[in-house]
Image (tube, grey):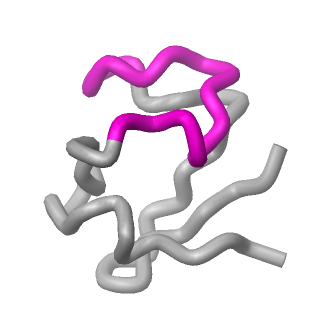
């Protein structure tokens, strides 16, 4: 699964870890996170993330 980076603060979303503190279970693909989810570090919307190569 691909990792995604916040273009504002550099937070890395790792699907293997998820974001359990904000309701995203480990193993959740970025594409499957609800559109209402925001960066847990800086609060920007999901569309401010880019896929890491």
- Taking 1 as reference, is 2 above or below it? below
- Where is residue 17 shown, x and y percent of the image? 61, 28
Q: Residue furthest bottom?
A: 7
Decide if residue 14 is on the left or right side of residue 46: right
Does residue 23 belong to the magenta stretch?
yes
- Taking 40 as reference, is 34 above or below it? above
Viewer-nearest residue: 7 or 33: 33
Tell me the quadrant of the picture where the N terminus can be found: top right
Q: Main secondary structure of the magenta part?
A: loop
Kindly identify the residue that appears in the image at 51 percent across and 16 percent down: 25
- Where is residue 30 shown, x and y percent of the image? 58, 45
Decide if residue 14 is on the left or right side of residue 22: right
Decide if residue 25 is on the left or right side of residue 45: right
Can you tell which quarter of the image residue 23 is in? top left
Viewer-nearest residue: 29 or 41: 29
Does residue 22 belong to the magenta stretch?
yes
């Amino acid at each position: 699964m691909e990792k995604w980076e916040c273009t504002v603060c550099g937070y890395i979303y790792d699907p293997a870890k998820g974001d359990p503190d904000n309701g995203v279970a480990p193993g959740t693909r970025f594409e499957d996170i609800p559109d209402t989810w925001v960066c847990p570090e800086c609060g920007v919307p999901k569309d401010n993330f880019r896929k890491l190569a």
